[in-house]
Amino acid sequence: MTNKLVTTERDGGVMIIRLSSPENLNSLTMDMRAQIGAAVDEAGRDHAVRSVFLAADGPSFCAGGDLHMLKTSCDPWTVHRRFRGLNQWLSPLINLDKPVVIGVQGYAVGGGMGLALTGDVLIAGESAKFMAGFFRLGVVPDIATMYHLPRLIGMARAKNFIFSGGTFTAHQAAELGLVAKVVPDDELHAMGLRQAQRLAEGPAEVMGLAKTLMARTFETSLSDMMAFEGFGQVLAMSNPEFHEGLDAAIERRPADFPGATAKAK
């Protein structure tokens, strides 16, 4: 029987996904990856889920790849199959058309840092340390680190960080814009959940559409991006969230985006 390495719970429109293997520093074993994928799939299919809060049990967020697995599973085809499997858990998380908040405490090392960077809003506890770690093992950065990090902090900073095997503290990461907010560790869960709730109470479906479009901005020309914005606005203005937001603005009242979406289902 597979151990429960990832737990989920609901708090209103928020799905909380929690890495729950602290004895293994929440390493990305094959079972851990599969269970993350299952949780993300559930969040994507359930229209009642309007945002996701990804957090972790224990003193550290994620230590990256499981070293014992890497020792025994490094032949070419095993590695190829493992990376092909990213389409079953990592890509769905990155492409999830709902806001994702990630809370990090302690170490986020290598692929664990890559996992942290998949979020739309990253909240860090004061103990958080983001570590490159890849070249210490003689491997290239993975878990989409080479995709996200240069986009978030620039190519020169990303190269220097990765090549030097660097470490960002929570406050250094915040200064670079990687982290939205730094809080005491004992406030991390409450703050992350509050951010996810705030997003869930907003026009979450339209946010998801904007997220999908913004993901294409670095590879897209200005004219094409403006065309995407136009097509996106056509979709946004056909969504009940738009009508609720507009009516609320005209009537000078708070908008009830979740209620408007629920009525339309």
Image (cartoon, rainbow, N blue to C red):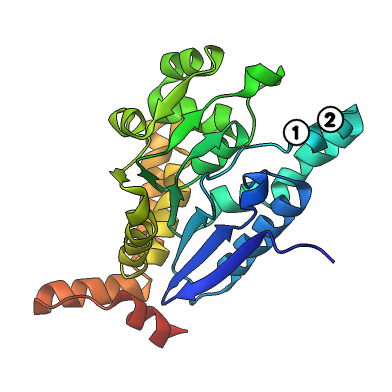
The residue at which mark 2 appears reads as 71
* Front in this rendered view, residue 48 or 261: 48
Categorize mark 2 by other alpha carbons within 10 Å: few (<14), some (14-19), many (20+): few
Residue type, mark 1 in image: Leu
**The N terminus - image quarter:** bottom right
Q: At numbered mark 2, what does the secondary structure look like: helix, strand or loop? A: helix
In the picture, the disc for residue 158 is none
Q: Is residue 214 above or below residue 241?
A: above
Categorize mark 1 by other alpha carbons within 10 Å: few (<14), some (14-19), many (20+): some
- Relative image position of residue 216 (x, y in whole percent): 48, 39
In the picture, the disc for residue 67 is 1
Q: How many marks?
A: 2
Q: Are marks 2 and 1 in contact (CB under 8 Å)?
A: yes
* Front in this rendered view, residue 139 or 216: 139
The residue at the point 75 percent across, 33 percent down is: 67
The residue at the point 11 percent across, 75 percent down is: 250
The residue at the point 64 percent across, 17 percent down is: 135
Q: At numbered mark 1, what does the secondary structure look like: helix, strand or loop? A: helix
* Front in this rendered view, residue 35 or 202: 35
Figure quadrant of residue 27? top right
Spatial CA distance of label 2 from label 1 is 6 Å
Q: Is residue 103 visible?
A: yes
Residue type, mark 2 in image: Lys
